[in-house]
């Protein structure tokens, strides 16, 4: 089956041909006709299977013959969890709509908001956004939803993991009730189904792969290693294999910075990418990696679903993730669109529990290799596959909102920044001094400090105290004589 049989128009088919695609992926074959029919869709597929085209192509087809968008309005809204993914989706929308008279924009946090507000003034047919920045723009009256026809939650499970549920619910409350809803996710977890109850209406479910499975095009293996030898091991692997392009995952931002510094010191061009980096630095690092100027991109899990490099040959887990599901998303950056990729993991003895959890999740024991000259001192325990079914996670209880989002995108609720409540008395009022209003109810309240004091006469004799004289008053002559 080719794209011509899916009901897409000639301008879109020409744009698809320009990208070198001639056959739709399984997720596209099932999702595109359903979206074209105007149905709500819940779609699950492993990363790298073409989910983005599965919803962007039919959306562009539906919007092409619609009414012209008004200023500051939007007709289709695509929400994504990270800045990199938002930019990637908008890039695909732009490519697929190049022969249509449709406009698209992308908005996310970490950059100045005014240029984004200017772009939205003429109206946008397709807007790709992160939740925090979208709410900021709405509160500044830079965006309106009266013309909204389609809402897409892309990587919905990742958005829930990153704590965006409150912002998502706020956004849903702002949108018109009559709209098409599309929910795309790597899994149909209990949390996703709970979210879907208030989002989609009589949806068509599309699922093309086993939950939490890895692509068959990815060759996986592990290298047992000592913690202090991991960085030299990685250098040897890159140099011996003459790797031109490698994506490496670390657990922490500081760890990513340290590893990138070490690699550059060893003559291997590397750049870190994580949430502490400015958007400009993240964009430059990704662009340099794609162009080949940087050989190694060292990332944290925040970028795991926002990096799409065609024909990326290998991914390395410098440290295993704490959450087993993140392993699937990490290695999914390679072996995309039918290409063959390799995934290596450097595993120390202390990470045995994380390794066993991953192997249980994907239901396979990963083959172990040994790098010459780097036999570990601390032996990694042997794997024994746990075939017991994994119980579905219970939906998480709603937590109080964080001061900031994990991706650095601020919600409108946090517009005052990080200043603790109660410090700015003009905004929040002030707490009464300790001891005030305690005791019996007949006690009088303390008078404001700016009221004129009563004269110190017999009327004040009841308390037995006199008002203190100002310090700068000249002493009387009697005092001098003393």
Image (cartoon, rainbow, N blue to C red):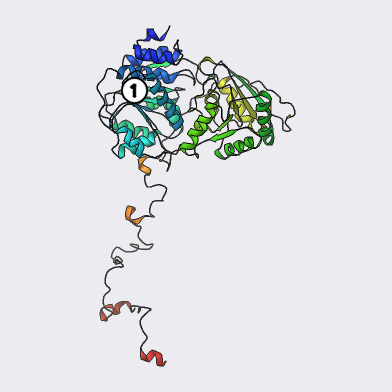
Q: Position of residue 135 (x, y in %)?
A: 34, 36
Quarter of the image holding residue 255? top right
400 to the left or right of 359: left
The quarter of the picture where residue 479 lies is: bottom left
Pick whichever, 229 or 455, lies toward us: 229
Seen in the picture, residue 150 relative to 13 is either above or below; the reply is below
* Residue of label 1: 181
Q: Few, some or many C-alpha atoms within 10 Å of disc 1 (few <14, some 14-19, many ≥20)? A: many
Q: Residue at x 66, y 23 (%)?
A: 241
Residue 371's spot in the image, x, y percent? 71, 26
Q: Is residue 70 visible?
A: yes
Q: Residue at x 42, y 25 (%)?
A: 91
As helix, strand or loop, the secondary structure at mark 1 comes to: strand
Residue 107 lies left or right of residue 382; in this view the side is left
Q: Is residue 17 left or right of residue 141?
A: right
**Position of residue 337 measured from the top left corner of the image (x, y, whole percent):** 50, 16
User: Residue 277, percent across and down?
Assistant: 50, 39
Number of numbered callouts drawn: 1
In which quadrant is the C terminus drawn?
bottom left
Residue shown at the point (38%, 7%) measured from the top left: 5
Tell which of 379 and 459 is nearer to you: 379
Residue 8 shows up from this direction: no
């Amino acid at each position: 089956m080719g794209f011509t049989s899916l009901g897409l128009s000639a301008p879109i088919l020409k744009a698809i041909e320009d990208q070198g695609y001639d056959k739709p992926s399984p997720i596209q074959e099932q999702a595109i006709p359903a979206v074209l029919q105007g149905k709500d869709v819940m779609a699950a597929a492993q990363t790298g299977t073409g989910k983005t085209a599965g919803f962007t192509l039919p959306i562009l087809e539906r919007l092409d013959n619609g009414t012209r968008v008004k200023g500051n309005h939007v007709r289709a809204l695509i929400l994504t969890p990270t800045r990199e993914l938002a930019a990637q989706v908008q890039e695909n929308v732009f490519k697929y709509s190049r022969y249509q008279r449709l406009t698209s924009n992308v908005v996310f946090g970490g950059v100045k908001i005014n240029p984004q507000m200017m772009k939205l003034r003429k109206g946008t047919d397709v807007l790709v956004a992160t939740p925090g920045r979208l709410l900021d723009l709405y509160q500044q009256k830079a965006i309106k939803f009266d013309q909204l026809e389609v809402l897409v939650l892309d990587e919905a499970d990742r958005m829930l993991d990153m704590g965006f549920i409150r912002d998502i619910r706020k956004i849903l409350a702002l949108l018109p009730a009559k709209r098409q809803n599309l929910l795309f996710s790597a899994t149909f977890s209990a949390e996703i189904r709970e979210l879907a109850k208030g989002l989609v209406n009589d949806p068509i479910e599309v699922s093309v792969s086993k939950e939490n499975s890895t692509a068959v095009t990815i060759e996986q293996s592990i290298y047992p290693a000592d913690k202090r030898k991991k960085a030299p091991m990685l250098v040897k692997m890159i140099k011996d294999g003459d790797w031109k392009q490698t994506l490496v995952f670390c657990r922490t931002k500081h760890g990513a910075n340290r590893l990138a510094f070490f690699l550059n010191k060893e003559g291997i061009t590397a750049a870190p990418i994580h949430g502490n980096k400015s958007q400009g630095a993240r964009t430059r690092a990704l662009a340099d990696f794609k162009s080949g100027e940087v050989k190694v991109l060292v990332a944290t899990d925040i970028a795991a679903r926002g990096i799409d490099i065609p024909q990326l040959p290998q991914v390395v887990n410098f440290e295993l993730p704490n959450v087993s599901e993140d392993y699937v998303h990490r290695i999914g950056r390679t072996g995309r669109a039918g290409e063959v990729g390799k995934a290596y993991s450097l595993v120390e003895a202390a990470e045995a529990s994380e390794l066993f959890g991953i192997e249980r999740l994907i239901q396979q024991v990963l083959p172990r290799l040994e790098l010459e000259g780097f036999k570990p001192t601390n032996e990694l325990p042997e794997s024994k596959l746990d075939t017991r079914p994994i119980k579905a996670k219970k939906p998480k209880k709603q937590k109080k909102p964080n001061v900031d989002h994990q991706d650095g995108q601020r919600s409108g609720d946090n517009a005052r920044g990080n200043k603790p409540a109660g410090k700015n008395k003009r905004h929040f009022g002030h707490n009464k001094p300790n001891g005030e209003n305690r005791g019996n109810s007949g006690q009088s309240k303390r008078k404001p400090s700016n009221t004129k004091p009563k004269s110190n006469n017999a009327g004040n004799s009841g308390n037995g105290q006199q008002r203190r004289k100002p310090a700068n008053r000249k002493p009387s002559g009697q005092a001098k004589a003393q």
